[in-house]
Amino acid sequence: MSDKVYRASTTAPVNIAVVKYWGKRDAKLNLPTNSSLSVTLSQADLRTLTTASCSASFSASEGDSLLLNGEPSDISGARTQACLRELRSRRAALEAADPSLPKLSTYPLRLVSENNFPTAAGLASSAAGFAALVRAIANLYELPASPSELSLIARQGSGSACRSLFGGYVAWRMGDKADGTDSMADQVAEASHWPDMRALVLVVSAAKKGVSSSSGMQQTVATSGLFRERIATVVPENMAIMEKAIAEKDFEKFAEVTMRDSNSFHATCADTYPPIFYMNDVSRAAIRAVEAINEKAGKSVAAYTFDAGPNAVIYYQEKDTEAVVGTFYHVLQGADIGGWKSADIKGLKPTISLDENVAGLLKAGVSRVIMTGVGEGPVKTDEFLVAEDGTPAKR
């Protein structure tokens, strides 16, 4: 029996949707009630790094394990198990077709993963996490699957993870088959098609959210009348307009759909019974600030969007950095918050002064910022979190 430890490492990005996924039509298969569309963010700022390893020498009684940010993490849940099962069965098929291949599908997996941002803080950590997990194991198993095929697997772990298997601008097509084989992601446009898209994330709270996305969305599906209108009419229209806006690099259209879709999603949360509130006063102050910036510019140069949490993600184009980032920087610079990139904020003038209530809420409520932009999909790397002997690598 060989003691060889097989390893593969990959990084995967966070994505932030501009047309939101909210609601499952099949909870077991993680099939959505509507299509969605996101921007993949740069891994220089937000990424998960995962090493997948396996060996005949790993203890079979201990089974598969995951170390996440240095802590043992439970992988016995149905979603993670569905991903592992599917990846193993694809490897087993390769081994059956070529008996000379090592029987990696039969070895226990040791997975080690780390994020460079807070987990479960409304920063789409599960999307990057499951995308990295699936991509790393697929690389370890040398599976010939395309990113779209792998997105089918990642989707079963975390719905939005299917979009993190691509860079740039990415759609998750809801599909209509009962078995989910057509519910997968595809790339609408590469990052290089519209490279000057930027995002400023205002981290309002790094605490875990009160109502998890999974339970929240199913309450909405069950009780919200507005939600039925959203999936029947609002989202299909927004998807069509958004794809056209991206193709034409039409930021004003992109911005309007991004803000309207975020508002629509949070309206269905408020229409859930009992209601769900993810945004807070600081989130609403960020909306007012974006409105003030756009009013001053005479057009939409900034677009807010909020996922299932209070953090604001504000999209803008690089040429409008002063109008957008300058405004927030001058409001927040007195507060002791990190994340500003000195090269990008140097010499930025405040183009508008915000209402003092809005400014006060932002100053008191924003704990840090993340300055980032559109970026690439998962990247294979030689940075290993598992040493050659199978133990967690010393960092």
Image (cartoon, helix red, strand yellow):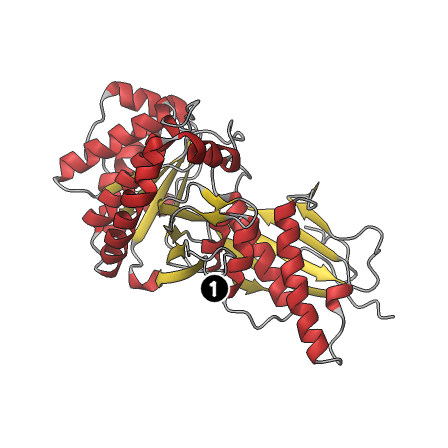
Q: Residue at point 73% right, 77% down?
A: 101
Secondary element at tag 1: helix
Of residues 319 and 207, the one nearer the viewer is: 207
Q: Residue at point 23% right, 55% down?
A: 245
In the image, is 169 to the left or to the right of 101?
A: left
Position of residue 37 relative to residue 228, above or below, is below
Residue type for callout 1: Ser
Q: Dot 1 surroundings within 10 Å: few (below 14), some, or many (20 or more)?
A: many
Q: Residue furthest right?
A: 1
On the image, the x and y values in percent for residue 72 come to 71, 42
Q: Residue at point 30% right, 52% down?
A: 197
Position of residue 144 relative to residue 232, above or below, is below
On the image, which quarter does residue 259 sit in? top left
Of residues 287 and 333, the one nearer the viewer is: 287
In the image, is 127 to the left or to the right of 138?
A: left
Is residue 40 in sight in this rendering? yes
On the image, which quarter does residue 176 sit in? bottom left
On the image, the x and y values in percent for residue 172 come to 41, 55
Q: Residue at point 41% right, 46% down?
A: 33
Q: Residue furthest front?
A: 178
In the image, is 239 to the left or to the right of 150?
A: left
Of residues 269 and 390, the one nearer the viewer is: 269
Quarter of the image containing the N terminus? bottom right
On the image, the x and y values in percent for residue 41 come to 41, 51
On the image, the x and y values in percent for residue 239 come to 29, 51
Query: Where is mark 1, residue-wise?
Result: 148
Q: Total marks drawn?
A: 1
